[in-house]
Image (cartoon, grey):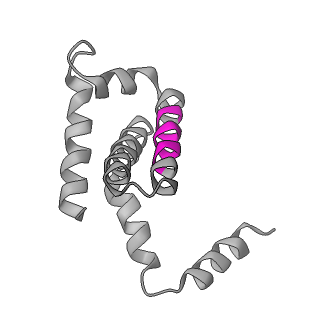
Amino acid sequence: MSDAVMSRLAATIKSRRQATAEKSYTKQLLEAGPARCSKKFGEEACEAIIAALSEDDDALRGEAADVLYHLLVLLEARNIDIADVLSVLEGRMGTSGVEEKASRSAKQQP
């Protein structure tokens, strides 16, 4: 999924704040708050894991799409812009995963 697709989906999710809960599942999630959005994201992540373990590629594609959607809803529920998340990812590019993880651990130590 490109940055443009993620940004468009995030904008659609944000626009659903103006919808009615009767017409929008996204609005229902946002009204339920971050705790409900977190729970739903976790459920979808577990379903993606199950699909991956079953080696069903079509199921994994569908569940991965659900995970991304529910992550964006969770971010919106917490008023975190997808551009900020993508910026964090961009800042990590060019650094090995081992180095990046070590730098985060070092920052957390007193």
Q: In this image, 42 relative to 1: left or right?
A: right
Furthest residue to the right?
A: 110
- Residue 80 in the image: state x and y as whole percent: 40, 47
Q: Is residue 66 magenta?
A: no
Q: Is residue 43 magenta?
A: yes
Q: In this image, 24 relative to 89: left or right?
A: left
Furthest residue to the top?
A: 22
State the residue at coordinates (78%, 69%): 109
Picture quarter with the C terminus:
bottom right
- Residue 52 in the image: state x and y as whole percent: 47, 56
Query: What secondary structure is the stretch in magenta mostly built from?
Result: helix
Picture quarter with the N terminus:
bottom left
Note whether 45 is above or below 25 in the view shown. below
Residue range highlighted in magenta: 39-48
State the residue at coordinates (53%, 40%): 42
Residue 86 quadrant:
bottom left
- Residue 23 in the image: state x and y as whole percent: 20, 17
Note whether 15 is above or below 110 in the view shown. above
State the residue at coordinates (46%, 77%): 92
State the residue at coordinates (42%, 70%): 89
Note whether 7 is above or below 25 in the view shown. below
- Give whichever of 82, 55 is nearer the camera: 55
